[in-house]
Every structure is written in structure tokens, then in C-alpha cells.
Image (tube, rainbow, N blue to C red):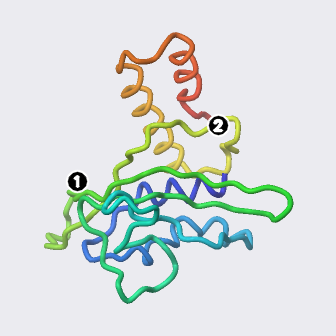
Amino acid sequence: TLVLQGSIDLADAVYPFGTYGRSIDILTRQYLFKNSMNYNHGTGHGIGHYLSVHEGPSFISMGYSSSDIPLTDGMVFSDEPGFYLPGQFGIRLETDIIVKNYTLPNNYSNSTTQFLHFEMLTLVPFEPNLIICKMLTETQKNWLNWYHTEVKNKLENTKRLNEDELRYLREKTQEIKC
């Protein structure tokens, strides 16, 4: 659940134009850090520019690179925090996200600052039986329920799923309540 919390917080982030991936990497690691945990890989890498496994020029990672550039509308990344206990187990959640321009609903500051956020590209529900619901914040629960509704609505209308697949989809995308 700690890994899921970080994945949700990154996917739900809103940040100013000019932000580097290294500046928001902490969003995925904060819950692990509070429990003296970490993972030894970047949180996200670019996808699809030249079809390399780890596309640059921008990454979501704690490290610094002189070739790094700020996140920009249209960039596609993985969101893949994890935790590994050598010889015992490991967990990694991976979704794909795209950077998009974001219009704030209430611009009280009359700021000319432009903002960005992520939109989800992956349409796979998170396994509810592996989530300790009471660990999630209300914002995280709301995001998870929104995401599962999006997954269900987009997939059940494709007419490509058989009855067993539809039943599975509806079961895994039920509202999280706790």
C-alpha cells in the first residue's frame, strides 16, 4: 500500500511549467521514506521517443543529469515505484502517464504561471485485495475510486470483453470503502 500511495500521489500531481522530474520524485518515495524504505531505481522514464526502453531526455528520478530537461506537455512516462526485500519479496507498480497542460479551477492569485499534470494512459485496475484501505488518505481513496471508474467505463464499452472478463473488470473496479 505504501508503494500504491506514492504511485497515486505522482499520478495526481499538479506542478508548475518548468518542473523537472527530480523535483517530483519525492512524491512516490515519501511513504517509503517514513518507514525507512526506498528503491534503488528511478521512478519513471520516458516512453516512445525513439522506442528505447528508457527514453530521455527527461526522467522522474532522484538523480541529477546535465542533459535533463523540464517536463513538457505531451511527454509520456512510466510511474513505477517499488520496494524490494532481498531474498524475500518485491513489489513494483507500473502505470504509464502523459504530461498535459492543466487549467486550475480557481486562479485566485491571477498568476500567469502555467501548470501541468499527468493523465493516466494505463487502463488496468489495482488489485483491491492487496490494498490496506485504512492507510490511504481521503484524497488517495477518491483518486483510486475515480481511476477505477475510468477504467471500468472505458473498457466495458469496448465490446471486446466477454462475460467473464466483464465480470472480472466490474469486480476489480468496485468502489473502495473503508
Picture layout, residue 24 above or below residue 53: below
Residues at discs 1 and 2 in contact (Cβ within 8 Å): no
Residue 50 in percent (x, y) is at 32, 62
Residue 176 or 150: which is nearer the viewer?
A: 150
Q: Amino acid at mark 2?
A: Cys
Mark 1 Cα shell of 10 Å, populated few (<14), some (14-19), many (≥20) = few
Picture layout, residue 82 above or below residue 172: below
The residue that disc 2 covers is: 178
For marks 1 and 2 on the same chain, the one whose residue lies earlier in the sequence: 1
Residue 22 or 6: which is nearer the viewer?
A: 22
User: On the rendered structure, is 2 left or right of 59?
Assistant: right
Give the Cα distance between marks 1 and 2: 29 Å
The residue that disc 1 covers is: 105
Q: Amino acid at mark 1?
A: Pro
- Quadrant housing residue 82: bottom right
**What's the residue at 39%, 67% (across, down)?**
55
Q: Residue furthest right?
A: 87
Residue 66 in percent (x, y) is at 37, 89
User: On the rendered structure, is 41 left or right of 114?
Assistant: right
